[in-house]
């Protein structure tokens, strides 16, 4: 049974904190966290992501970027990455995690676009992709209960 989910992106300031907040809202019984493969450790969530999150009733103002560590990989029941490359990175770094690492938008066969240092429209695209991926995983995880 899935009780804990780790969302993973690169810097842990845009995509994974948003994905974690969306999934936590959908499935409050889960322990949902986020981390980055190359986290901007200690940084807050990106201002544009914070604004988009607020517009959808989510608060990211307390987020602090965290680097993924062995304990994350070991203790999480499910790890969702934003890209196929991040999935491969996690599996290479912690081979025992294989089998519980998936790409958030695997079903759509796509990576979530990285909006970092790009135009607001790219952030909005990433938000839409994340929302769709979270919706699909929420349904799948709800069915297992």
Image: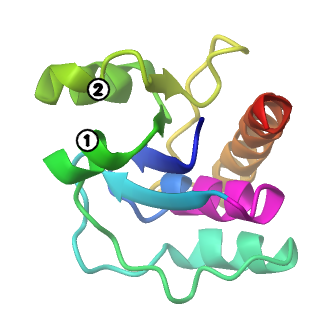
Residue 12, image quadrant: bottom left
Name the disc covering residue 106, or none. Answer: none
Q: Residue at x 62, y 17 (%)?
A: 106
**Residue 13 at what x, y percent from top left?**
43, 65
Residue 108 position in % (x across, y down): 73, 15
Residue contact between numbered discs 2 and 1, judged by CB atoms under 8 Å: yes
Prevailing secondary structure class for the magenta stretch in the rendered image: helix
Label 1's element? helix
Residue 85's x, y, as percent? 34, 22
Crowding around mark 2 (Cα neighbors within 10 Å: few <14, some 14 to 19, many 20+) is many
Residue with the mark numbered 2: 97
The residue sitting at the bottom extreme is: 62
Residue 107 in the image: above or below residue 104: above
Q: Quadrant of residue 113?
A: top right
Residue at 63% over, 77% down: 50
The answer, for residue 11, to whether it is visible in the render is: yes
How far is mark 2 from mark 1, CA to CA?
Answer: 7 Å
Residue with the mark numbered 1? 74
User: Residue 69, can we see it?
Assistant: no
- Residue stretch rendered in magenta on the structure: 17-29
Which part of the image, by quadrant, shows the C terminus? top right
Magenta region includes residue 25: yes
The residue closer to the viewer here, 31 or 18, is 31
Residue 72 left/right relative to 55: left
Residue at horizontal 72 percent and vertical 51 percent from the top: 127
Q: Which residue is more in the foreground, 78 or 81?
A: 78
Q: Secondary structure at mark 2?
A: helix
In magenta stretch: residue 32: no
């Amino acid at each position: 049974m899935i009780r804990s989910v780790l969302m993973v992106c690169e810097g842990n300031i845009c995509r994974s904190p948003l994905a974690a907040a969306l999934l936590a809202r959908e499935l409050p019984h889960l322990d949902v966290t986020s981390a980055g493969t190359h986290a901007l450790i200690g940084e807050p969530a990106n201002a544009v992501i914070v604004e988009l999150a607020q517009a959808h009733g989510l608060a990211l103002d307390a987020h602090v970027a965290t680097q993924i560590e062995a304990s994350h990989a070991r203790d999480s029941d499910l790890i969702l990455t934003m890209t196929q490359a991040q999935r491969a990175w996690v599996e290479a770094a912690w081979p025992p995690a294989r089998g519980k690492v998936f790409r958030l938008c695997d079903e759509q066969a796509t990576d979530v676009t990285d909006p970092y240092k790009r135009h607001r429209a790219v952030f909005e695209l990433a938000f839409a992709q994340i929302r769709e991926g979270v919706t699909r995983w929420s349904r799948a995880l709800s069915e297992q209960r």
